[in-house]
Image (cartoon, rainbow, N blue to C red):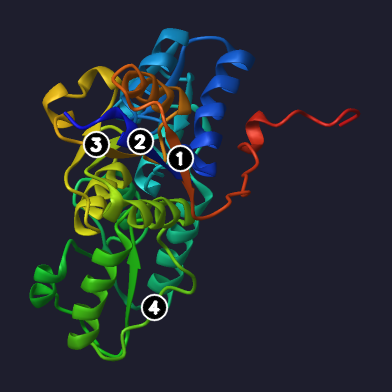
Amino acid sequence: MSGSENKRVLLAKPRGYCAGVDRAVEAVERALQQHGSPVYVRKQIVHNRHVVETLTERGAIFVDEADDVPEGALLVFSAHGVSPAVRDQARERALRTIDATCPLVTKVHGEAKRFAREDYDILLVGHRGHEEVEGTAGEAPAHIQLVESAEDVAKVTVRDPDKVVWLSQTTLSVDETMETVRALRERFPTLQDPPSDDICYATQNRQVAVKAMAPSCDLVLVVGSPNSSNSVRLVEVALSAGAGAAHLIDFAREIDESWLEGVEVIGLTSGASVPEILVQGVLDFLAQRGWADVEEINTAEETLTFALPRELRPSRAGR
């Protein structure tokens, strides 16, 4: 094992909660405070095991579909968004709903609807089966085709090559997405870009921070759940940017001691749905093993916040 005088942790900043996750988690907490339990949530409110377990303990019930919710109950839509068909299901069951969809996802839904109205073929770059992709595709299923990677581009068929636009899932790797878009543009030279960047600011910022520190790291630890797209991408970004090794963990207890052998510099970050308490747990674990020297690598300041869903905002006096 290396001498402890060289052991240090590079701690990425920004990391952890983004504004959309913060809003979604608080929405469930406020709903429980205001309405009592149970509050039903369609799918995981955000893709993080600790968050889901904590909210379950407080009285949230996570379900797969609106059909699983008793008629007239309260249902929260997750940060990843839902399709119009899901909203219809909720109405049919007379459910009271709170929409915790991230506003940046809502923006992509709006773009999908607009381009469908203008009769474009929409090429959605994203991962099949991801809730966000299902929600966006559901806004205009007749117009949207999913493109998972540059390899998929050859299979794409469009009605008019001069009337094609691409949109993307908000939590992808910026570099991989642009590689797919370049391949699409080779096939469709007049391919239109989204009116504004679809990949979320937080996803980009976390990837930039990891890229900045990865070349100096023997090992990068990414705190996040395996079903969190942006967390999985951070592992890939760390490896492609030059980290000696990189692993995804939900909790400090998942760190394999063998990963630490011969390691001096450890990079640490967390996905956009990860509470800071889990990062602190990893720092404590590493400090006990000689990595007490922590240097923060700060590549951006995040100040964006989103208002809570209107159903949860305090009512104005006198209204």
| Mark 2 in CB contact with mark 1 (< 8 angstroms) | yes
Question: Which mark is on residue 295?
Answer: 1
Measure how far apart labels 4 and 2 are at the Cα level.
42 Å
Callout 4, which amino acid? Asp
**Which type of secondary structure does the marked residue at label 1 adopt?**
strand
Measure how far apart labels 2 and 1 are at the Cα level.
7 Å
Callout 2, which amino acid? Arg
Q: Residues within 10 Å of mark 3 (few under 14, many from 20)?
A: few
**Residue shown at 66% from the left, 37% from the top:** 310
Mark 2 or mark 1: name the one nearer the start of the chain.
2
Quarter of the view holding residue 211: bottom left
Question: Which mark is on residue 227?
Answer: 3
Q: Is residue 69 left or right of residue 257?
A: right
The residue to which callout 4 is attached is: 193
| Closer to the eye: label 2 or 3 | 2
Relative to residue 166, is residue 127 depicted above or below? above
| Mark 2 in CB contact with mark 3 (< 8 angstroms) | no
Question: Which mark is on residue 8?
Answer: 2
Mark 1 or mark 3: name the one nearer the start of the chain.
3
* Front one among 244 and 99: 244
